[in-house]
Amino acid sequence: MLEIFQYSFMIRAFAAGLIIAVIAPIIGVFLIVRRYSLFADTLAHVSLLGIAVGVLTYTNPILTALATSLIGAVGMERLRARTKIYGESILALFLSGSLAIATVIISLAKGFNASLLSFLFGSITTVLTSDLYLIGGLGVVILSTMYLVYKELFFIAFDEEAAKVAGLPVEKLSLLLMILSALTVALSIRIVGVLLIGALMVIPGITAIQFKRSFKQTILLAVIFSLLSVIVGLFLSYYFGLASGGSIAVVAIIFFLSSLLYHPVRS
């Protein structure tokens, strides 16, 4: 079974996948607590717009996806904070709008091709050494930032109004969380794919919540479920010729369904 590690592309895939498996659920738990779970899916569709631009202009799609995700995250958070538009309406606006523009650009680029499909559903063979450096570098930045502002993000996630009263810069902290989410989404594209990024960010988190532990323990459990999902998913993807993103998401869903059996026993 370990023959899988004879290939350099699989080593790169596992390295990138494990980094993402740690980052994604940490961000995801904060989004879940703030009832912003669909934000990850919305950013994924915004990043699809960036990928379409990259394919059309022969630019690195990861970089263009990163740029559009950051712009989308800032735009959504600004609208949420400074207008009376409901949060779910803002998400729907950006999701449908970016998907519509991406569809037009894809048609200009002569439609779907193998490269574009790999970004949609994930592909273990497409992780380049340069991608690994980018994922690793930005991964360190994301984790370091989360560590430094953990208490503040915890506060605004559970009670934004109380955080304002306590004098915390709630708007800036919310914007920071959105930016970190955008970075995570863009970095996850190679492994999970645009259409399934939300699954890796959200499903391990809601699985961990079923065990009703403290917030820190919930994050730890979410990371463990995410790591197991990525490892098992990549093995399934390699040995059965499946899309890596779909395999990882299916394993994550199985863990979630299994966690539902735990709650009645504890009750």
Image (cartoon, rainbow, N blue to C red):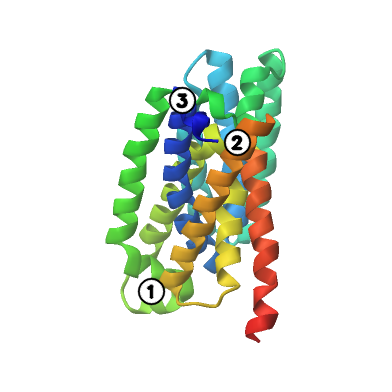
Q: Is residue 145 above or below residue 56?
A: below
Label 2 or label 3, whichever comes before in sequence order: 3
Q: Nearer the viewer, residue 212 or 35?
A: 212
Q: Which residue is mark 2?
A: 193
State the residue lying farthest toward the bottom: 267
Amino acid marked by disc 2: Gly
Q: Is residue 180 above or below residue 224?
A: above
Q: Which residue is mark 1?
A: 164
Q: Residues within 10 Å of mark 2 (few under 14, many from 20)?
A: many
Q: Position of residue 80 (x, y in %)?
A: 53, 58
- Picture quadrant where residue 134 is located: top left
Amino acid marked by disc 3: Gln
Cα distance, mark 1 to mark 3?
53 Å
Q: Are marks 2 and 3 in contact (CB under 8 Å)?
A: no
Asked which secondary structure carries label 1, the reply is helix
Q: Which residue is mark 3?
A: 6
Q: Position of residue 129 (x, y in %)?
A: 39, 24
Label 1 or label 3, whichever lies nearer to me, is: 3
Q: Nearer the viewer, residue 247 or 98?
A: 247
Q: Residues within 10 Å of mark 1 (few under 14, many from 20)?
A: some
